[in-house]
């Protein structure tokens, strides 16, 4: 697939075209064909998550936006909810039964195309709609184009903006929602899972206690006593 935007402009003298009309016509047809290559029609794309689509064996990613990953959760009023799944559902509902056209913006090293998609009957692109409705963030690493749409969603608390969340690019690096919420008075022992997968518990006066954050979505938890922690299979953290 060739990106029409990077093709150089051709400056051809008029008298040359008149003398070589057949060749000129061939050049015009060739360029028109190359231009058409930039468009990838996805009449019935499969939604992978909020910013990735698939048709057959080709997978594309929406340009300039970053949606919660499929398994990502957000926190609203103390309750976790599957914001990644709901972001994908929002895309499915938005494009259901309509033609989707995607235009190449760039090609990543992994071979995946990064695209801007339009949906028949809609003025907003799919990219812009996702950010404006709060189901994706403006991916400033690539462009600031969707920052105004993000500000609208944030101001009105749309989508994930109505809850606590980890930006998707940080979530992919392993960052999770942290909580110091103590569900029961006296339950102050922190059950943490370290990078080695070890289940360790920390007492309030222990070193690193204040630095440890409990990520309940990862399986970490609070304990009311050392006996409770050990009974659940957790070990005391080194002093």
Image (cartoon, helix red, strand yellow):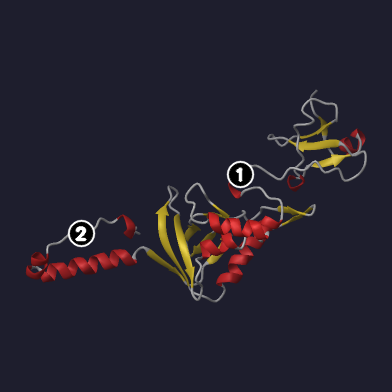
Callout in the foreground (2, 1): 2
Observer able to see residue 157: yes
Q: Secondary structure at mark 1?
A: helix
Q: Residue furthest top?
A: 239
For residue 174, above or below residue 18: above
* Relative side of 198 to 159, left or right: right
* Relative side of 200 to 108, left or right: right
Q: Which residue is mark 2?
A: 10
Looking at the picture, tell me which residue is in the foreground, 143 or 57. Answer: 143
Q: Which mark is residue 80?
A: none
Identify the residue at horizontal 83%, vertical 26% (top origin): 206
* Relative side of 137 to 188, left or right: left
Quarter of image, res 195: top right
User: Which x, y percent locates residue 179?
Assistant: 77, 43
Among numbered discs 2 and 1, the one appearing first in the sequence: 2
Observer able to see residue 135: no
Quadrant containing the C terminus is: top right
Q: Which residue is mark 1?
A: 170
Identify the residue at horizontal 41%, vertical 59% (top origin): 104
């Amino acid at each position: 697939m060739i990106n029409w935007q990077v093709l150089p402009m051709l400056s051809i003298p008029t008298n040359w075209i008149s003398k070589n009309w057949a060749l000129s016509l061939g050049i015009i047809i060739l360029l028109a064909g190359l231009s058409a290559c930039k468009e990838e029609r996805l009449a019935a794309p499969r939604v992978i998550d909020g910013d990735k689509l698939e048709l057959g064996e080709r997978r594309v990613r929406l340009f300039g936006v970053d949606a919660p990953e499929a398994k990502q959760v957000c926190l609203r009023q103390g309750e976790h909810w599957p914001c990644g799944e709901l972001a994908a559902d929002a895309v499915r509902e938005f494009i259901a039964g309509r033609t989707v056209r995607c235009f190449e913006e760039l090609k990543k090293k992994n071979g995946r195309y990064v695209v801007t998609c339009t949906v028949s009957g809609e003025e907003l692109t799919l990219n812009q709609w996702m950010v404006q409705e709060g189901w994706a963030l403006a991916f400033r690493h690539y462009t600031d184009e969707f920052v105004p749409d993000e500000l609208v969603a944030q101001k009105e608390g749309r989508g994930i903006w109505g809850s606590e969340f980890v930006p998707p690019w940080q979530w992919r690096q392993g960052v999770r929602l942290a909580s110091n919420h103590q569900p029961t008075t006296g339950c102050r022992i922190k059950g943490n899972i370290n990078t080695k997968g070890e289940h360790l518990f920390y007492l309030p006066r222990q070193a690193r206690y204040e630095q440890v954050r409990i990520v309940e979505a990862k399986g970490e938890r609070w304990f009311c006593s050392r006996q409770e922690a050990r009974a659940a299979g957790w070990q005391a953290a080194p002093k």
